[in-house]
Every structure is written in C-alpha cells, then in structure tokens.
Amino acid sequence: MLKLENFDALKLSLASPDTIMSWSHGEVTKPETINYRTLRPERDGLFCERIFGPTRDWECHCGKYKRYRYKGIICDKCGVEVTRSKVRRERMGHIKLASPVSHVWYFKGIPSRMGLLLDMSPRNLEKILYFANYIVTDVHEEVRQDMLAVLNIDKDERAVRLRADIDAKARELRQEHEAKAKKLKGDVEAEVSRLEEELQEAVDELTTQGKKATEHIKAGIGTKSRRQMTVGQNGDEEIVIDKGDLMSREMSRGVLAKVQEKVEKLEANTKAAQKRAKERLDADKKALESQIEAATKTEREAIQGQLEQLEQEIEATRTDLEALHAKQILTDTQFRDYQERFGRAFRAGIGAEAVRDLLSRIELQSEMYRLREESKSSSGQRKQKAIKRLKVVEDFRKSNASPTWMVLEVLPVIPPELRPMVQLDGGRFATSDLNDLYRRVINRNNRLKRLLELGAPEIIVRNEKRMLQEAVDALIDNGRRGRAITGTGNRKLKSLSDMLKGKQGRFRQNLLGKRVDYSGRSVIVVGPELKLHECGLPKKMALELFKPFVMRELVNKGYTTNIKSAKRMVERSRTEVWDVLDEVIRDHPVLLNRAPTLHRLGIQAFMPVLVEGSAIQIHPLVCAAFNADFDGDQMAVHVPLFSGAIAEAKNLMMSSQNILSAADGHPVVAPTQDVVLGCYWLTATRGDQPADTSKLRIFSSQNEVLLALESKVVKLQEWIRVRIGTETVVTTPGRVVFNQSLPIGRKPMDEESMQSLPFQNAHYDRKLLRVLVAELYRLYGSEVTATVVNDIKRLGFRYATQAGITVSAMDIPH
C-alpha cells in the first residue's frame, strides 16, 4: 500500500497521460456499478474488483482463492488479486477517451491559463472547444506564396479569356449584322424587280388596251361605237369610248394620250414605291447598325463588369490568403469557403484536438524570452498582458509540465471507496454523485467510439464530442460552465471540485482541519482577574484534556497501583484527582485557537488556571489579537504533548511574547474599551492648569500624594504640585496613581543608548495608551510590558467602575 508518513513538502501539478496510466490498475469500459441480483461489482465497471481490488479481505471475486495464504495471487478465473479490501481506497482506474477534452480548471479558471498561454480570449476559446467555430492550427507558408504567385497568372489568363469572349461576341454580332443587311438588301432588290415587272405588265396591258381601242376606232371611223371600251386596271379604269359615241381620228389621238397619261402615272407610282423601298432599306440598315452597336456596348460593359468583379475577387482572395494566420477563428461557412479556395495552404481544426495541436507548438523557452522582451519594450495594457502570460509560461517551465497536458486524453477514475455505494434499509442504494457523473462520461465515450467505428456523419460526431466535453466538465467541476447537471429533486450533483473546495471539502474538513485528540472547545467569557499569560480552563475540561497525565501522576504518587484503577479514580472525580490536576497543569501551557485563524496570533499559548463552570476565560487584552468578543464566540483548546512542543509554546507562542502585531509592528496587546475609559477618567483634570501654580498644594513625594488621596484630603483630578526626583511637577493625584503602575526611572535593556521612562504627565486616551505600550516594549521588552499592561488593565477597570460611568445590572431600575 501507498504510505505517506515522512515527507517534507507537497506539490500539486498537472499529470501527464503517462502518469495517469501509471496510477491506473485497469481501464473502466462499462458504466455499470454493481449487479442488482448478486450485489457484487460488475466486471470492467465503476466498482470492478479486477481493477480496484477485492471487496472482501483475502478473497477473489469468484471465491476460488480465500484466506491469507494466497496473498498476492491473481485469480486466473476472475482476474482479481488476493489482498486486503482497503486497497479499494487507493487503487485508481482510467477511461481512455475517444476524443481529447480540455480540463475545465485551466480553460474556465480566472484567469484562463489556457487562454493566456495561447493568447486567446476565453470566449473565443470556448467557441473552439465546444465546436462552434474552427481555428487555424497551421499555415504552410511555401504553399501560400505559390498560391499568391498563381493568383496573378490566373487573373491575367481569366482577363485574356474575357477579352477574347468580347472579340468573339463582336465578330458574331457583326456577322449577324451583315447577314441581316444582305437579307434586307435582297428583299428590297426583289421588291424593286417585282415593281419593275408589275410596271412592265401594266404598261403592256395599257398599250394593248390602247391599241385595241385605236384599232376599233380606225375600223369604225365616222360610225357610232357599238360597245364601251376602257383603259386602266385595278380600279383605275377610265372609259375612252362609250357606247354610241361617234368614232373619229381625234378620238383615236385622245385614247393614245390617255394611255400615255396612264403609263406615266404608273411609272411615277412605281418609282415612288421603289424609292420608299430603298428608304426603308436604309432605315432598317441604320436600325440594325444601332442594335449591333448597343448589343456590342452591352457585351463590353458586361465583360468590363466581369473584369472588375474578377479584380475584386482576386484582391479579396489575396487579402484573405495574406491575412490567414495561426489561431485565426473561422466560422463554419468561412471554413468551408477557405477549404475550397486555400485547402492546401492551411490546416484548421475544431474542439480540444485543435487546441492540443496549438499547445504542442508552443516552445516555452523561446516564448519566455519573447515575452520578457515584450514586457520591457511595451507599456500599459500590452505590458500587463505580457507579464500575465510570462507568469503562466514560467510556471509551466519551472514545473516541467507540458501545456498539452491541459487537454486530457486519459481520464483518471478515483478509488471506489472515495465514491461509495451504500445499501439502505429497504434494499435501496445511496451512491456518491461522482458515480452518476462518471457514468455519463463512460456512456458518451462508448457512444462516440461506436459512431467513429461506423463512420457516422461529421455533424453527428462533432455533437457527440461536444457532449463528451460537457460530461467531463461536469465531472471535474459541475456548474463551472453552463447549467449544472442535477439529480433527484433538482439538486446539483457534487463534482470532483466540490469534493475538494470549500469548508466541507477534503482539504479544510479532512486534511488541514482534522479533529485531534487532546483538544476541546467551549464558549469564551472575559477573565478580568487573569494575568496576560493566563487563561481560565473549566475544571471538567481540564481533567478530560490532561487525563493521561493525571493518571500517570496518580500512579507515581502512590494513590493507586495501575492505570486502570487510576482511570476509575478520574472518572469518579475523587478529591486526590483535583490536587494532582493542579500540579499537572502548573507548568504545562495550552494553546487557544479562535477560528478563523487569519494570522499567527490566532493561536497563542496560555498557562491554564482552573475555573468553575463550562466557559473558557481569556484575558481582555488579547481579544484584539484573536478578534474575539463575548457575544457567543467559541475557542478551541489544544494540549502540546511533547517537551519540544511545550518549550515552543512557552518561548514563542505565549501571549506575553506576542505584544506586537506581525503585520505593522504596532502593539496588538493594548488597552481598549472600559480600560481606556478608566485610564481616561483617572488622568483627566478639572479645568485647565492655572497660570499661577504657587497657590497649589505641594507634596514632597508621590507616596505623600497617595496618602493624601487615601485620606481624601485631595481629589483625583485636582491640580497639585509634587516633587519627583529633583523637579517639582504640576500634575494630578490621578496621574500619580497611574504612574505607580509604570516602571518610572527603571533602567532600560540597553542602558547605554536609551533613557529610562520619565514621569507620564498626560491625559491618556486610547491612542496615547498604544504609544505608551510601544515605548514600554522598546525600552523594557515583552516581559516587563506584559506586567505593566496587566497593571494598567487593573487600574482601568477599577477607576471605570469608581467613576460611575459604566452600568451594572444593579443600576437598572426595576
């Protein structure tokens, strides 16, 4: 078994994965605790006997090996070592995590050690660890430079392609224009030809009609026409010979003239139609030309816009690529975009794995030199930040701890006896909250392993990793981040941190604040009659504390023959016991402690004085050191047992040796409250000192003043003259009384360099009394000072009472 009995110091530091594995006696892979039928621990579970040791002394799980003679044998059937069951208090296990997780103390502490080391804000770090954002872990500089060089070439190539597209489009439009123009020209020429043909046909028709009419006239000149004859066509017919008209040569010439007129009209109409067709051709050509120009311009503008957009894209890409750096935070969308554009130039990650990669790249030595230079060269906030970071780097370097150890790959499982499961009446079980928290971690870890084996989608795996991180956070410090995990009745589960911290934690409750033998506790009351180095100890408490010493003395003095009968005498509180107790405690100091012990004066040594009752009595002047009052405060009593401890208590811890405060060197043992009031009244005067002191009563010595005061010849606060040494001093009888408690004229410790304390002729308030105590300590040391302050206390209480200022129970009317 592990034995820690002789050690000089205790150091807490980060544990490496190898160290955690060296602690472990096996991997916990199942979330089960005990079998509900056999009530024995499940194999590979949180209470597994193969990992943590047997539940029964010298017996394996299956019962094949029993008794001490098989000590150290590992059962070939169940794998359990035959040993004591108490090894279950010290043997640890481990959980191999499917994905690294961060330690919440180092990430979420104030200040965040992980954040300081990485030079990242805790908020950004949280986004990385809980799978909200990606972080760039590495940038390949050579690849980046190559990509930047390629950007210009790519830009030129794409610009050339775009310009070629413009030219091709222009040629295509021009060809289309020429084809359309050619078609239009052909259409017009065809129309002109058609018009010519139609004209020729119409002229021929008119000529034929004219010829027929003239022939008809020639044939019947001088006779009347038997029929009507017309020239023209298509609604433009005109009668040239009507039925019954007399035909003559003039009529023939008139017909020819009419035909000629019709022909000329047709020719004019045809020419006008041809002209219109040609004009339409010109207009269509111009319109087509305008369309081509507009289309070409639109294409050029579109291509120019594309060129500008290309320029902006290339510039944005260049800016993004040049700005890309390690520890850059990327959103999910940004990461996919960057991955597509600069996939070869950088590496980014998410979660604790990415943080571990960054931590592994930190060179503590070079970082320390860099931060030292920065702290010297910079100022203000940057300097403060550099100093904070330097402190963390120095701490890691000095402790020989790797920053990557802040990210856990292996999780230790504490011994089962420190997280027990107890069967209650009725068959139900009460279990430690840690078992529930460990169970959550194991369940999520196993599920993540299964998803990774199945090749589940990335988003599902990421969610499961985040849940594992949250489960480990809750195990280490439940509620530190986010909502705390609760159990039945909405009660927050106690995590490993809760087991350690606070008043009820392992350190303050069990390690530093153990309950010890030879100690007691009781309410304190004031002991005005005590000396500074004394405390009043109740008789019954003293007898219980010093019982072994009393029993030994009873045997040594012959009151009894053996310890057993001596114990019986003590229990019956025989008269001899109290006499022996008086002798035992006579030179045996006790330690008094008042919680909280905020400084070394919180524990002091006193010589015990037996008192009646059940309350511990303490000297009123040590209350300031203990910060004690008498409204129900309690104090603990401890008995030093060995001669070395007793000597240390007498020489170093005695209250009479602790006059001054270690904090500022001012007296911590000084009169307060009623004592100050009494001294203030004692040294007060009635009115100001008279200008003419010759009429004041004069006394030859201080003793004569005291005799006159006792005889009521003078009053305490009356002005008098008294001879002190070789001088006559104007003072009051009260001040003479006050000086009787002081070592006036006594030689100081260092006779050569110091003068003795002169007659104190002042009106003493609290401040002056503290100055007086400090002066006494300077001149005469702690022993004389302790005696004097005790006398001042006695004077203060007496004259505060005599002054009638204080109120007693008898002063209050019924």
Image (tube, rainbow, N blue to C red):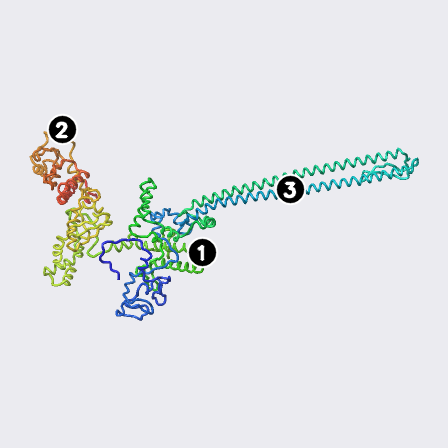
Q: CA distance from mark 3 to mark 1?
A: 60 Å
Res. 489 in view: no
Q: CA distance from mark 3 to mark 2?
A: 132 Å
Q: Residue at x 31, y 69 (%)?
A: 75
In this rendering, position of residue 15 left or right of residue 286: left
Q: Nearer the viewer, mark 2 or mark 1?
A: 1
Label 1: which residue?
Answer: 460
Label 2: which residue?
Answer: 691
For the residue pair 742 and 320, the one nearer the viewer reads as: 320
In this rendering, position of residue 516 left or right of residue 586: right
In the image, residue 324 sits, relative to residue 691, either above or below, namely: below
Q: CA distance from mark 2 to mark 1?
A: 100 Å
In the image, residue 402 sits, relative to residue 700, either above or below, namely: below
Type of amino acid under label 1 = Ile
Q: Residue at x 16, y 60 (%)?
A: 571
Type of amino acid under label 2 = Ala
* Residue 304 figure quarter: top right
